[in-house]
Image: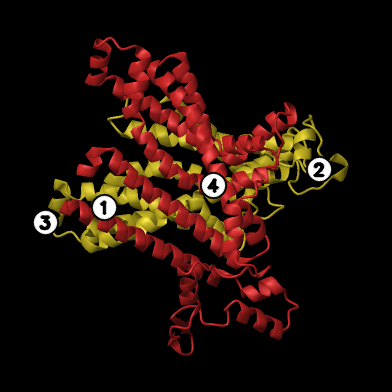
Chain colours: A yellow, B red
Amino acid sequence: MNRLAYIGIVVAAVFILTAIFAPLIATHDVTAINTAMRYAAPSAEHWFGTDAIGRDVFSRVVYGARISLEVGIVVVVVSSILGVFIGAIAGFYGSWTDKFLSGYVFNVFLAFPGLLLAIALVAFLGAGLGKLILALCIIGWVGYARVMRGQVLKIREYDFVQAARALGASDFRILFTHIMPNAIQPLIVQASLGMAGAVLSEASLSFLGLGIPPPAPSWGTMLEEGRGIDILYNAPHVLFFPAIAIALTVLSFNFIGDGLREYLDPKQRKR
Amino acid sequence: MKYKVLNFLRQTALLLLVVWTVVSLVTLLIELVPGDPATAILGEQATPEQIQGFNKTHGLDKPPFFFSYNSEKGFVWNGADNRYLDYWKGVLTGDLGNSFRTNRPVLGMILARYPSTIELAIAAMIIAVGIAVPLGVLAGTNKNSLIDNFSSFIALLGISLPTFVIGPFLVYLFAVKLEWFAPTGSANPEDIILPAVTLGAALSAIITRMVRSSVIEELGEDYVRTARAKGLSEKTVIYKHVLKNGLIPVVTILGLQLGVLLAGAIITEKIFNWQGLGLLLLDEGIGKRDYRLVQGCVLVIAVTYILANSLTDLVYRRLDPRIRLS
């Protein structure tokens, strides 16, 4: 893998560990209000300063990792299971099933700009963690389905699959014990890029006020709270730290995804 | 010829099918509202008469679809007098209904804001191309040099940094620190620069990478050697021969990205308080629970996105004979 992918792995590991051990790392209660300390600059007491109502920005960024990780993992797991299942059916059964799924259903989901669909769903369903995750899964599964379909179309023609079929293996067995293990590599790449996408989409929706409602410390909500022009003049730290957290996290998963893709694709691998 | 016509018909049928599905999904979105829209708009204190009047005004007293499911009666056929068909009739006659809040026609509200969003998207595209083409050519002609690495780094940042990170950073740098531009609004002509750069950053990064790899690929072609052997200057070779072929994929990505820009403009408009369609959707639509307006905005953005993508596909087919013939 390339050097950037290793950097990505290190940053992603820091992000995941921060999310897991957030209660141990955070220095303050994330919801504790202290109006006497509004917009305090970074100091030994508050490493990243404080926000509009005196909450500790460092602790909120740390807990924000937890929200991002939670959303990212659930969205990747649910949408990958759904996408893999639908993609496998499309690729394996071919014919009209494939024409309907890949020719029509996939195109409909790809025709809708992902963020717009998520915005529309959340706008009508209402804000909240569960609804946000549901919206992101609805827009996320099609990526996995396309990858899986392509893999199944290729692998189902291999001799070992034909041999399994000749031995009388059921469709289910052929799909899940013979094809799946050989189709998993590009799905891992997709999952890594999907993680970056989910973190970004969660932050985008929270930034627009359609994600996780305050006072939960979502990075997107923190950015939204810190982007006022007065705040940028007087307390830019309120905006900068969550912005850096989002950028680093998204970059790390993109680096990992790109690195894995390059590593798993012999044509792109530098020898 | 027969293949061409069949292919065109197939593409058109798919386009119509996709548009039909998108419109249908948008039409039915209103059914997702917890409770009912009338209570959401009028509040818990609204009298049954007020709710009834509201529902009648906006056609919400009709059944949502051709059939409905009832736990007691099972599937019930509602006939053609339903909200789904009404919305479709409206869409086909250019009527997207009236705003739940202001009772003004939704289409009029959208058309008043649409030009601002298009203006922003086009400005973003111009800035993106203006930065990316020279940068991509420089990187491609100086492969593996410092310039190449620098442009790759800039491109990577542009792709990875989300709009809502780039935007506030640009405001901080150019409006707060340097005071070159106003932080928000669109009062002066130059106010478009920061939002356009924010919106175009990712596109610029994508095009830079694309132009770079195109230039590298084209530089290895026989016609470039011939052009050089004829004694043409390197500048003529690059800008007259290499770029002409190398820009074909860029045209495609521009078309595909027009739709992405229109959708992405929602966040940029919010950051810069740019009075476009995105801000209308967020502030007037979602913010005030004006579901009819949300439906209209989502529909217009989605259909623009689909049409932009389809048009690009057509243009690309005309530009590149290999695709036309395959």
- In the image, what residue type sits under mark 4? Ile
Q: Is residue A53 left or right of residue B213?
A: right
Q: Mark 2 touching mark 4, by CB under 8 A? A: no
Q: Earlier in the sequence, mark 2 or mark 1?
A: 2
**What is the secondary structure assignment of the residue under circle 3?**
helix
Q: Chain of mark 2?
A: A
User: Which of the numbered marks, if any, corresponds to residue A54?
Assistant: 2
The residues bearing labels 2 and 4 have C-alpha atoms spaced at a distance of 40 Å
- Which quadrant of the figure contains the C terminus of chain A? top left
Q: Mark 2 touching mark 1, by CB under 8 A? A: no
**What is the secondary structure assignment of the residue under circle 4?**
helix
Q: Are marks 2 and 1 on the same chain?
A: yes
The residue under label 3 is A166
Residue occupying image coordinates x 40% and y 39% = B253
- Which quadrant of the figure contains the N terminus of chain A? top left
Q: Chain of mark 3?
A: A
User: Which of the numbered marks, if any, corresponds to residue B118?
Assistant: 4
The residues bearing labels 1 and 3 have C-alpha atoms spaced at a distance of 15 Å
The residues bearing labels 2 and 1 have C-alpha atoms spaced at a distance of 55 Å
Of circles 4 and 1, the one toward us is 4
Could you say which quadrant of the image residue B217 lies in? top left
**What is the secondary structure assignment of the residue under circle 2?**
loop
- In the image, what residue type sits under mark 1? Thr
The residues bearing labels 4 and 1 have C-alpha atoms spaced at a distance of 51 Å
Q: Earlier in the sequence, mark 1 or mark 3?
A: 3
Say few, some or many: other residues with alpha carbon within 10 Å of mark 3 (under 14 / 14 to 19 / 20 or more).
few
The residue under label 1 is A177
- In the image, what residue type sits under mark 3? Ala
The residues bearing labels 3 and 2 have C-alpha atoms spaced at a distance of 70 Å
Q: Is residue B10 left or right of residue B281?
A: left
